[in-house]
Amino acid sequence: MKLYLWTILGISMTMPIQWAAAAAAAAAADNPVSLLERSFEFDRSVKAFSTESSRAAASEARRQFAQWFGDDYSDIKLAEQTDDDLQVLYDIAEHALFVTLDPGYIENARRAFEELQRRNATNSVHLMRFYDMLAMARMFPEAQRFAQAHPEIEYRPLPGVREENELPVGVPTVLKIDADAPGLVRVAVDDPMKIVAIVHPQCGFALQALGEIERDPLLASVFADALWITPPSDLRDFEQVRQWNHDHPASQMTMMYRPEEWPEIDQWGMTPAFYFFRDGKLVGVFSAWPDENGHDKLVAALREAGLMENR
């Protein structure tokens, strides 16, 4: 399996170097008081919940952010912070966004960023990180405007994104490679689903699983209508998705729009994960691709879910 919760598509979620000197003391603190100590406790607690599910980690991040940092982003509080503590607050807001994928944390990051900018304490890394946060939050027009406002930075251009007309309310959506234009189109997934596969084009375990499926005609037929989705990303994997679709035309990959549209999917930070549905209800999950006997274990999971007959 490959973990994307703490390192999403190459974006490191580790804390800044200046935090390292206080790491040992902060980790041992039973009652974190300072901003630095609270930030380490936030990181430790959310990581602990990530072993349960991405949804559990997101819930814990929301709870702890509100408890420990909810009052730190007012204009008055930000003006009182040192430059180093402002950097910590910027990092915490980014961390919360990447764990929860909640666009609301953009505002916290923006406040810290603007105070750093007022002090002439920002650099190109701050700018690129904020741009990536906007893309991760699916705030595409805002990301484009931000890039235009800072032409001194060579941003990775986002693919164009359009929406199908009249997307139905309450129906999950994905971003797929646009056949009619160079970019992505957001489409509704309104057909009955049997299998949803959470994969990433660079995940070796996902490629192993796909290889087993492609080599077995019966498995291939079961997965003929499967929906292949990447975990939420800032779209930097767009070309990799295009290459996957070229190499595996029977298993076309799409990109998750927002995870809250998929309440049954509780682990979007780990790939591959296969969710099995029958009559619109989740009936089984197979994740953490094993080092051995992956084919047989996948078949057993499909049979248990009633999606594959014994042979």
Image: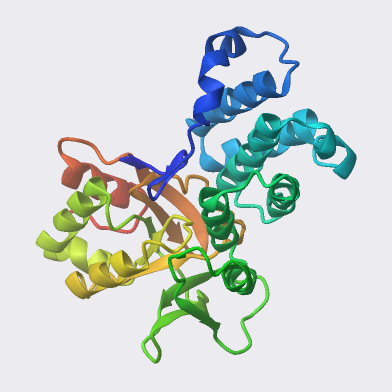
Question: On the picture, is 140 further left or further right than 275?
Answer: right
Counting from the top left corner in percent of width and height, residue 287 is at: 35, 43
Q: Residue at x 61, y 82 (%)?
A: 167
Q: Residue at x 54, y 70 (%)?
A: 151
Total numbered labels placed on residues in the image = 0
Position of the C terminus, as image quadrant, is bottom left
- 23 and 83: which is toward the camera: 83
Position of the N terminus, as image quadrant, is top left
- 297 and 253: which is toward the camera: 253
Q: Residue at x 69, y 30 (%)?
A: 85
Q: Is residue 239 visible?
A: yes
Q: Residue furthest front?
A: 120
Counting from the top left corner in percent of width and height, residue 138 is at: 58, 65
- Which of the 4 image quarters holds residue 246? bottom left
Q: Residue at x 40, y 62 (%)?
A: 236
- Which of the 4 image quarters holds residue 88? top right
Q: Residue furthest right?
A: 76
Q: Is residue 71 visible?
A: no
Counting from the top left corner in percent of width and height, residue 26 is at: 61, 13
- 60 and 73: which is toward the camera: 73
Question: On the picture, is 213 further left or further right than 160?
Answer: left
Question: On the picture, is 89 further left or further right than 276?
Answer: right
Query: What colour-coding does the image apply?
Result: rainbow
Question: On the picture, is 69 further left or further right than 57?
Answer: right
Counting from the top left corner in percent of width and height, residue 141 is at: 62, 74
Is 69 drawn above or below residue 190 in the view shown? Answer: above
